[in-house]
Amino acid sequence: MAIIFSDYIQVIHKGNEIPSLKIHKSNDSKFMFDLRINGKRIRKTITVNGTTRGKNIELASFALNEFIASESKKSLTSKSLTASPDMIVNDYFDRLCEIKRNSWSAGHQYKLKGFFKRYIKDIIGDKPISAVKSSDITTITADVSHLSKRSQKMVTEVLHPLFELAIEDESIQVSPIKKSHRVTRKLVEEKRVISNAVDKYKKVYQSIHKVFKDNPTMRAIMLFGFYGRRKNEVLSLTWENVDLKHKTFIIPKEESKVGVDLEFTLSDDIKEALEEIAIYTGKEGLVFKSPRGGKYTEIRDHIYAIRNDTKIEEFGFHWMRNLAVSALSSQGVDTIHLSALLGHTDTHTVKQYLSLQRKEASGKVQEISNIILCK
């Protein structure tokens, strides 16, 4: 589809223009690169999925810089991309990012590169890849031990694919990452035990259907959360990953925390809401489009609506995952099925359900849920 150049205006962020970057007039998740490289004018559009307009601009600016660097490299033979045991970690990381350029989203690259620069580069960046020892990884993990568990896990999220690539290149024989370097989490989310979980489970379900009776978009979004999905997984869902006929949907690896595509059973009530949505919006692109046509960045007001209706002060989107665990486990759902349903990333958990069909697991959990809700 041809680019309508007049739909884009110059990006101004924090009072400054960002050269070569333009933003769509009515959709702040769409951007256009407009620049010259080696005398040739290049125009290219991208779509990003940040949580705010400012975050979208940061992601687009990052993608622009990556694009410029990539285009500049096309006319050069980059020595740094030639793998060898003597290649330093900084260059090996650049090699990894170049190889993954088309499979990693701009947001994922932005996150990994930022973490590498801040916490890893100064410790092992100038070392040959073959000289990195387990003690170096221990130093890195110790340096980030004050961060959240999620941030600590970024160490292996960054370095695991790096050393896997080095092994594939035969630059090293064994990864220096050991079991002790991996941050694990409980098999299911037991951090917040919810009292009267079954009663609250029923109340929230009824409230979602009552408050959003005439709003299939918000009804479906909230029901996805009710059945255990993460907010970003839901808001990023596209029609190409929804199969209404066979009642399944897929969370692609770019949006999942396991790094692989995850398939789940689609509940009847969500299927019904999606069919309503499809009548008005069609089945292309994002399933849930904001009033401006882009991705929803915030649903705070809708969460407040459920909170006010149920009088459950702690109600929130992620809280519904904890609610599901508390309610369903009290009715005898196996821990392994709950783990599969929630999409945990813990190595111990993953090993247990590698042979388990996640779609089958979510279907079994759905059966128990229906009993609780008296469907």
Image (tube, rainbow, N blue to C red):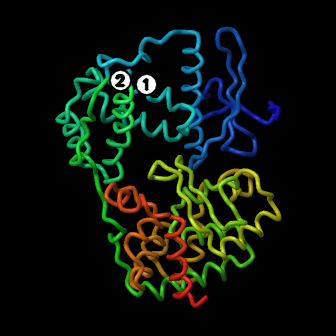
- Please tell me which residue is depicted at 66% across the width and 76% down the height of the picture: 269
Q: Which residue is outermost to the bottom?
A: 374
Residue in front for this viewpoint, 286 or 367: 367
Residue at the spot 43% in from the left edge and 24% down from the top edge: 94
Provide residue 216's location: percent of width, then percent of height: 72, 71
Q: Is disc 1 in contact with disc 2, using a CB cutoff of under 8 Å?
A: yes
Give the distance between the C-alpha atoms of the residues marked 1 and 2, in whole angstroms: 6 Å
Q: Amino acid at mark 2?
A: Asn
**What secondary structure is found at the residue carrying circle 2?**
helix
Q: Nearer the viewer, residue 177 or 111?
A: 177
The residue shown at (49%, 63%) is 357
Assess disc 2: are there few (<14), some (14-19) or many (≥20) residues with their C-alpha within 10 Å of its C-alpha.
many
The answer to whether residue 14 is visible is no
User: Left of 316 or right of it: where is 285?
Assistant: right
Q: Quadrant of the N terminus?
A: top right
Residue 226 lies, with reference to residue 103, above or below; the image says: below
Residue marked by disc 1: 94
Q: Is residue 186 visible?
A: yes
Determine the residue positioned at 54% across, 20% down: 69
**Quadrant location, the C terminus:** bottom right
Question: Where's residue 355, x and y in %?
Answer: 43, 60
Q: Position of residue 267 (x, y in %)?
A: 62, 73
Tell me the tag on residue 90: 2
User: Where in the figure is residue 256, as x and y percent of width and height?
Assistant: 50, 53
Please tell me whether mark 1 sits on a helix, a strand or a loop.
helix
Quarter of image, res 6 = top right
Q: Is residue 74 above or below residue 316?
A: above
Which one is in front, 210 or 73?
A: 73
Quadrant of residue 264 within the rendered picture: bottom right
User: In the image as oriented, which residue stretches furthest toward the left?
Assistant: 135
> In the figure, is residue 132 to the left or right of 169?
left
